[in-house]
Image (cartoon, grey):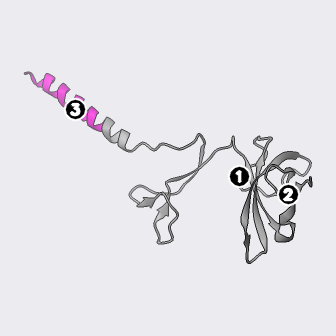
Amino acid sequence: MSSSILKKKLLEVRLKEQNILLKKGRIYAPFEGVVVTKISEVGEYTTPIYSTIGVSSGIIKLVNYKISEGVTFVNEKRASSLHIGQTVDIKSTAYPDAKFKGVVKVVIPVVIKESAAIKVVIDIIEVDQTILPNMSIDIDFYSV
C-alpha cells in the first residue's frame, strides 16, 4: 500500500473517532427552549438533582417561552375559595396597562409555616413574550 492510501485510512479512522466523541458530548434537552444561563464549566462535576454539597446541579438553564406559568402565595384564610380551573386576571408590574387571562393550575395543599400562605400555580393562557420568566406579576382571583 502506498503512503497516501495509508494516510487516507488513518484520517478516516481519526474522523470516526472524533464523531464518536462528538456524539458522547451532545446534550439533549427534554423540551424546546432557549439557553439563558450556563451553570457548569468544562471539567466540573454535575448532578441532575439539586445538591447542597458544592456540586453544581445541571449544565445549563433552559427556558421554554411557549409555556407560561405564574406562581403566587395566597393567605391560608382564602384557601377555601381556591380551586383548580378558577379564572384569574394577570397584570405585570412592568406593563401595568396590559391584562392577561389565566387559570389556577395547581393549589399546593401545604401551608407555608413562616408566611401562613399556600402556593398557587397559575397557567397563563395568553402566552406571549410580554411576560418573561421571573417577572413580577399581580394576580386577581375570580370567585365562582
* Residue 13 drawn above or below residue 47: above
Q: Which residue is mark 3?
A: 13
Tell me where residue 115 appears, x and y as whole percent: 77, 75
> Sequence order check: which comes first, mark 2 or mark 1?
1
Q: Secondary structure at mark 2?
A: strand
C-beta proximity under 8 Å, tags 2 and 1: no
* Residue 40 drawn above or below residue 76: above
> In this rendering, which labeled residue sits more in front, label 2 or label 1?
2
Q: Which residue is mark 2?
A: 138
Mark 1 residue type: Pro
C-beta proximity under 8 Å, tags 2 and 3: no
**Label 3 crowding class (10 Å Cα cut-off): few <14, some 14-19, many 20+?**
few
Query: Quarter holding the N terminus?
Result: top left
In magenta stretch: residue 11: yes
- Residue range in magenta is 1-18
> In this rendering, which labeled residue sits more in front, label 2 or label 3?
2
Q: Which residue is mark 1?
A: 133
Q: Quadrant of residue 127?
A: top right
